[in-house]
């Protein structure tokens, strides 16, 4: 059997139609979009069309879409840009403990530069309470950032309620929707957000391109200085082919969204049930409902995640773990830590993330090899009670 990829939250293969659109753009549309001649205008038109398409798919206006180099830059621009723009009003920011590092590290940077950051806790299933957010807002709060769907466990936050609370308080609300776009419906007006980040390589588009939606009248200070690209918010010659690819990928993902959501809910549920039936002491991290169904994060008691990854890799199956081995010590995922998952279970967590090309056959093969792997690793485990 061909290698099986179950790491779609990490990145996705590029759709063939996206490759085609990008190839045509790279080969035939190389003008600088800022040039006034016909070559430049042709590139400008391609970008304008892509911007209109992305805006329409998100329910936004074209001039509210800013292309960036990916999710990380979009998150940095939202948090740092809003913090800097709001500096006269105050120096307080709110986010959560379970955000992606693009937000967490931006928060740490801002703390070092005079801002105060509140990191909201979550419950045992990774949910953040709207009331906690309400209580955390102060007169000095200048921006709030809470992710739509978590990359490790798939938990979906009550973004619309949170954005409503912030709107009442007059605080701009940003959501990192990098793991939500293409998986669940994402419309900026339904969510009521001021800013939203997305990244093409999570929905079968190319890497190194993303976008930040910024609602009209939201003030942001640019991070990159140079030319007047992206209406002076993001200097740098536009990546025409990747922008075209992002728009094409979003269009395809939108067309497939309902069908894929149904298919992956079934396939993800089947996978989890089978694994929990065939292997004992396996726990789902995150809620059963209110989650992206293609993310199945499981903790295997008494086994280290890294060992499972290596064993699965030898069987041709690619997954990732909730713990990372940094400089010899096993670092537990900050998300599982915030959820107060028992450290032993957190160390044995594996994220299976399914996607467009995942088949029932691949899932059945994974179900067939996993019990043996876990049994072998548990037999060698110093912590697992094999007699139980
Ligand atoms: N935010 C979330 C939730 C993510 O999962 C990722 C990617 O892993 C990012 C941000 C960063 O996006 P990019 O890889 O495009 O920089």
Image (cartoon, rainbow, N blue to C red):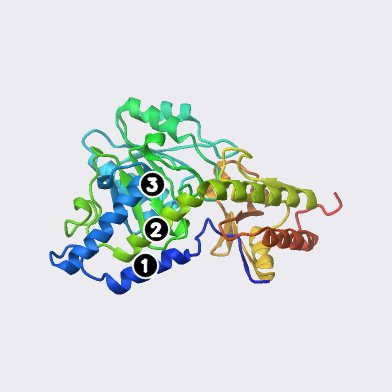
In the rendered image, residue 278, in percent from the top left (x then y), is placed at 79, 52
In the rendered image, residue 202, in percent from the top left (x then y), is placed at 47, 56
Disc 2 residue crowd, few under 14, some 14–19, many 20+, Cα 10 Å: many
For the image shown, how many numbered marks are present on the structure?
3
Q: Where ligand 1 lies, by image quadrant?
A: bottom left
Residue denoted by label 3: 57
Report whether residue 94 is seen.
yes
- The residue shown at (31%, 74%) is 27
**Residue closest to the eye, 196 or 244:** 244
Asked if the residue at tag 1 contacts the one at tag 2, i.e. Cβ–Cβ closer than 8 Å, the answer is yes
Q: Write down the quadrant of residue 304 in the picture.
A: bottom right
CA distance separating discs 2 and 1: 9 Å
Report whether residue 109 is seen.
no
In this view, the residue farthest toward the right is 387
Residue denoted by label 2: 248
- The residue shown at (23%, 38%) is 87
Mark 3 residue element = helix
Q: Which image quarter is the N terminus in?
A: bottom right
Q: Which mark is residue 22?
A: 1
Asked if the residue at tag 3 contacts the one at tag 1, i.e. Cβ–Cβ closer than 8 Å, the answer is no
3 or 2: tag closer to the N-terminus: 3
Disc 1 residue crowd, few under 14, some 14–19, many 20+, Cα 10 Å: many
**Residue closest to the eye, 8 or 36:** 36
1 or 3: tag closer to the N-terminus: 1
Mark 2 residue element = helix
Disc 3 residue crowd, few under 14, some 14–19, many 20+, Cα 10 Å: some
**Residue closest to the eye, 370 or 269:** 269
Up-down relation of residue 266 to residue 15 (above or below): above
Left or right: 91 in relation to 208: left
CA distance separating discs 3 and 2: 11 Å
């Amino acid at each position: 059997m061909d290698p099986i990829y179950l790491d779609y939250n990490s990145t996705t293969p590029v759709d063939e139609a996206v490759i085609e659109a990008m190839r045509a753009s790279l080969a035939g549309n190389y003008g600088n979009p800022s040039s006034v001649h016909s070559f430049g205008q042709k590139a400008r038109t391609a970008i304008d069309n892509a911007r209109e398409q992305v805006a329409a798919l998100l329910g936004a206006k074209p001039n509210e879409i800013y292309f960036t180099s990916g999710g990380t830059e979009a998150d940095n621009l939202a948090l740092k840009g809003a913090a800097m723009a709001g500096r006269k009003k105050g120096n307080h920011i709110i986010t959560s403990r379970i955000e992606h590092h693009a937000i967490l590290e931006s928060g740490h940077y801002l703390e070092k530069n005079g801002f105060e950051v509140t990191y909201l806790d979550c419950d045992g299933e990774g949910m953040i309470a709207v009331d906690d957010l309400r209580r955390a807002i102060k007169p000095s709060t200048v921006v709030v950032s809470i992710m739509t769907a978590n990359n490790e466990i798939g938990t979906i936050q009550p973004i619309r309620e949170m954005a409503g609370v912030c709107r009442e308080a007059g605080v701009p609300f940003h959501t990192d929707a990098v793991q939500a776009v293409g998986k669940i419906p994402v419309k900026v007006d339904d969510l009521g957000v001021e800013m939203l980040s997305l990244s093409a390589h999570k929905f079968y588009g190319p890497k190194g391109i993303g976008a930040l939606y910024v609602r009209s009248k939201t003030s942001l200070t640019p991070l990159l200085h140079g030319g007047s690209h992206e209406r002076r918010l993001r200097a740098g010659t536009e990546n025409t082919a990747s922008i075209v690819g992002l728009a094409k990928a979003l269009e395809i993902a939108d067309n497939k969204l309902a069908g894929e959501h149904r298919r992956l809910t079934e396939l993800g549920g089947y996978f989890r049930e089978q694994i929990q039936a065939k292997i004992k002491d396996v726990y789902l991290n995150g809620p059963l409902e209110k989650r992206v169904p293609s993310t199945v994060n499981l903790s295997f008691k008494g086994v280290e995640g890294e060992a499972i990854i290596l064993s699965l890799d030898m069987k041709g199956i690619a997954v990732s773990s909730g713990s990372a081995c940094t400089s010899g010590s096993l670092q537990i995922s900050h998300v599982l830590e915030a959820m107060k998952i028992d450290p032993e279970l957190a160390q044995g967590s594996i994220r299976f993330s399914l996607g467009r090309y995942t088949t029932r056959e691949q899932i059945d093969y994974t179900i067939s090899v996993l019990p043996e792997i876990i049994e072998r690793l548990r037999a060698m485990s110093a912590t697992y009670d094999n007699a139980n």
